[in-house]
Image (tube, rainbow, N blue to C red):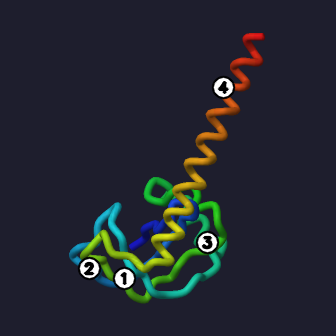
Amino acid sequence: MEFVVTDLITDILVRYQGPLPDLFREGHSVVVEGFVRPLEDPDKEAAAAAAAAVTEKARGIDCFFSATEVLAKHDEKYMPAEVAKAIDANKKKIAAAASAAEAQDEERERNQRS
C-alpha cells in the first residue's frame, strides 16, 4: 500500500505492507512508524507509474517512508503540541505566500494599466 502523509508543506510517500487499521481514511490523521529510505531507480519508475495516487511534491523527493506500523487516530482534535504548532506555522506560511502572490498580481495589474 502506498499513500502520502503531509504537514501541509512537505509531502512524503509512505509504503506499508500489512493490514491497515479500520479507521484509516483519506484526510484523517495517522501515526506512522518506520524509516526513511532512498528511492532506487526502479522505485522511481514505479512511483511514476502510480502518479495518480501520489502527489507531485511527494514524487519530487528522492526518498520514501518505509512504514513498519500504521495507526489511525480516533480523535482528530488531539495532537502533540509541537505538531499542532508546526501545522499552525505552516498554515501561516501558506497564507502569507498567498497574500504576497495576490499583492504581486495586483501590483502587476496596476502597472499594466499605467
The Cα atoms of the two marked residues, 3 and 1, are separated by 25 Å
The Cα atoms of the two marked residues, 1 and 4, are separated by 45 Å
| Secondary structure of the residue carrying numbered label 1 | strand
Alpha carbon distance from label 4 to label 2 = 47 Å
Q: Residue furthest top?
A: 114
Badge 4 element = helix
- Residue 99 % position (x, y): 60, 40
Q: CA distance from mark 2 to mark 1?
A: 7 Å
Determine the residue positioned at 31% across, 70% down. 77
User: In the rendered image, which residue does mark 2 sit on?
Assistant: 21
Of helix, strand and loop, which one carries label 3?
helix
Mark 4 or mark 2: name the one nearer the start of the chain: 2
Amino acid type, residue under disc 1 in the picture: Val
N-term mark: 4 or 3? 3
Task: Check disc 1 and report the residue beneath it.
Answer: 70
Q: CA distance from mark 4 to mark 3?
A: 45 Å
The label on residue 106 is 4
- Mark 3, residue position: 42
Circles 2 and 1, Cβ within 8 Å, touching? The answer is yes
Residue drawn at (50%, 77%) of the image: 82
